[in-house]
Amino acid sequence: MKIRYNYVEKEKVKYCEASSTVKEAYDQLKKTGYRSIPVLDESGKKFAGLIYKVTLLEYYHEQDGKDEDSITSLIKDQDAFISEEESFIKAFLTIKRLPFLAVINDEQEFAGIMTHANIMNVLEDSFGMKTGGYLMTVATKEHKGAIKELVSTVKDVNIEGMLTLDNGDYLRRIVLNLSHELTEKKLNKIISKLEEKDFRVTFIDDVHKEKAAAGKGK
């Protein structure tokens, strides 16, 4: 999956330019309420890095910074960007230490940002949080052909997604996203078939119920 379909486009992003003063950048950050925003070059097209609210505050209070000073020396994380043609997994691994990633198009111009919320939306989709269904966690001893055997055992059911955990460990957990159309009787039959094959069903989440419960808690 490429990230071009999963980021906030430039038109919806608040940013400042590298020519901004400390006060201009700080005012922009206060206006947005964010702890960091992207910085673009004077053309407004090229990504120059990130400016952090805490960096500006430290500059004011610890370095006796002035409102009219340039933010050039305060810009950080100039490498916090990714191409919109890159894979989702690269973005997932890169964004960990950052508030967001700048997204660069084919012309090497700033196209928008990928946020942690974007990442969560993709993960929610893979877990069936949008369509509902059952998330069945299955434990198995790690062995060649384990996933093939698992899928073959539940071949009569529509598997809408699958996630493997504990890869490389002796015991592996596999999470199956099964159709919301399953009846309780059919679900129990699947559990029995899996246990006959030495798979152990450790947990089942009803996505519809979890979403309803989460909604009540807001």
Image (cartoon, rainbow, N blue to C red):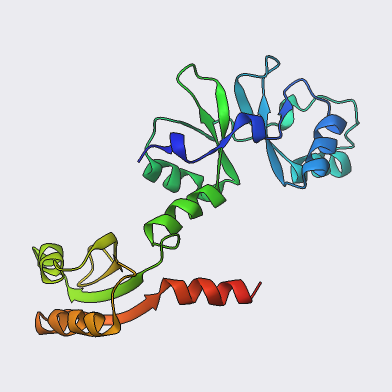
Q: Judge whether 173 appears above or below 105 on screen.
A: below
Q: Image check: 144 left or right of 77?
A: left
Q: Image check: 17 left or right of 10?
A: right
Q: Judge whether 148 appears above or below 101 on screen.
A: below
Image coords of residue 103 (percent x, y): 52, 32
Closer to us: 132 or 53: 132
Q: Judge whether 165 appears above or below 14 on screen.
A: below
Image coords of residue 89 (percent x, y): 37, 45
Closer to us: 95 or 86: 86
Q: How many marks?
A: 0
Q: Residue at x 50, y 19 (%)?
A: 108
Q: Residue at x 37, y 57 (%)?
A: 126
Query: In which image quadrant can residue 195 be found?
Result: bottom left
* Quarter containing the C terminus: bottom right
Image coords of residue 92 (percent x, y): 44, 47
Q: Image check: 166 left or right of 118?
A: left
Q: Residue at x 58, y 30 (%)?
A: 78
Q: Judge whether 72 appears above or below 94 on screen.
A: above
Query: In which image quadrant can residue 4 be found?
Result: top left
Q: Image check: 124 left or right of 80?
A: left
* Quarter containing the N terminus: top left
Closer to us: 11 or 99: 11
Q: Residue at x 80, y 24 (%)?
A: 20
Query: In which image quadrant can residue 161 be found?
Result: bottom left
Image coords of residue 30 (percent x, y): 82, 43
